Amino acid sequence: MISLHLEKSRAILDGRLRFVRARLLGQKVPRATWLARAQEDKQLLLTKASALARKYVPAPTPAQQASKKAFSFPEVIRKEETPVSFKPAVAPPQVKVVQKGSKVRQSVFLACMALSFILLAVLFGPILYFRFFTHEVVPVQTQETGTPLGGEFTAPTPEVEVQKPPRDENLPEGNWLIIPRIGVNTEILESKVPEESLIKGVWRVPEFGNPGDQTEPMILAAHRYGYNWWWKGEYWKYHSFYLLPDLEPGDLVEVISDKRKYLYEIYAGEEGTEITDYDADLILYTCKFLTSDIRHFRYARLIDPSKYVNYATAAAEQSPATESAQVIQ
């Protein structure tokens, strides 16, 4: 055993000396070579150890060798397999669940669908119609031959300078529009952007005439269908042209400006996409449907103030209520 340890120590010492010498000489010591040498040293030690073991361990007797049993694998015990007959899988019977109130919900759903289709047809039907079918200008017809202030509807507007009516300090400031027949009683708004005024009421087109002007017509426009929540109350009755199609030749229109009251008389009207009579002194227009290009137009001429004496009787007959002729302060 002592010699075995001495040889092992000597092998280790030789390896270290070789490593130090390689380092001093600048040589590389391959790791693979060192491992191979280590394996050789280990194998040498094992060989010597086996020799020493055989030297000091007594050999087995013949009786011991005879009693030694040969190696054999353990016996595997298999269980008997019972044949399995094939049985097709039978699906369990399906149970139909019937919920209470399903028929009621189905009826409500169908009713909602029908109402939705009707609403879509009402809103978008006119748009589709006017997209695919042409339209013609429809003039306003009347059975009367004259106006409350005299004159024929078919007679041309005389080119006579009309004197301005006298100032009345009891009249309100600003520009106002009053149409007794349909109850309109609102302030005339002016702005460069039309929607800024149309969202509130009647808008005067700035490129055309002013109240009482006979050189070019005064054009007033307003929405027929309000799109704000506050239009759904009483507001629309006084500030929109929803009832403008009800105006007929002979109906009167008041315009207050600079504390002067100008009186106009409707003499014609039509449906179309553009104004056709720019000889009128006053032009009123609004849309026919919510999103269509068709407009309702009404044309009016300025009345000479000398004929205003007959206005009180004519206005009283046209006004549905006396309070509609009062300006909203």
Image (cartoon, rainbow, N blue to C red):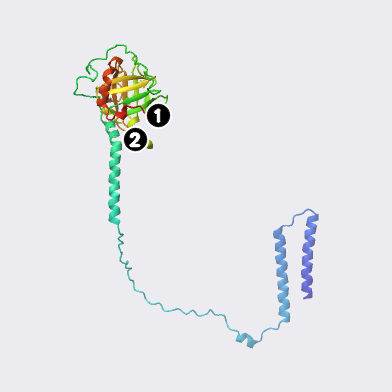
From the top left corner, tell me how far across and down residue 78 is, in percent.
45, 78
Amino acid type of disc 1? Glu
Q: Quadrant of the N terminus?
A: bottom right
Any part of residue 276 in sight:
no
What residue is rendered at 78% in x and 70% in y?
7
CA–CA distance in space, label 1 to label 2: 21 Å
Front disc: 1 or 2:
2
Asked where in the image residue 129 lies, by quadrant, the reply is: top left
User: Residue 200: x and y, percent?
Assistant: 39, 30
Residue 236 drawn at (x, y percent): 34, 33
Q: Is residue 108 visible?
A: yes
* Local crowd size for mark 1, using a 10 Å CA cut-off: few (<14), some (14–19), many (≥20): few
Residue 134: x and y in percent read 26, 28
Would you name the residue on which mark 2 appears?
234
> What residue occupies the far front of the structure in this picture?
170
Residue 257 vs residue 53: left or right?
left
- What amino acid does circle 2 point to? Glu
Residue at 27% across, 20% down? 311
Upstream in the sequence, badge 1 or badge 2? 1
- Decide: few, some or many residues near mark 2? Use Cα within 10 Å; few <14, some 14-19, many ≥20: few
For residue 286, what is the image quadrant? top left
Please tell me in which quadrant of the rendered image residue 126 appears: top left
Q: Is residue 173 above or below residue 31?
A: above
Position of 329 relative to 277 (above/below) = below
Q: Say which residue appears at 80% left-offset and 61% top-offset.
A: 17
Farthest bottom residue in view = 63
Residue position marked by numbered label 1 in the rendering: 195
Q: Residue at x 36, y 35 (%)?
A: 231
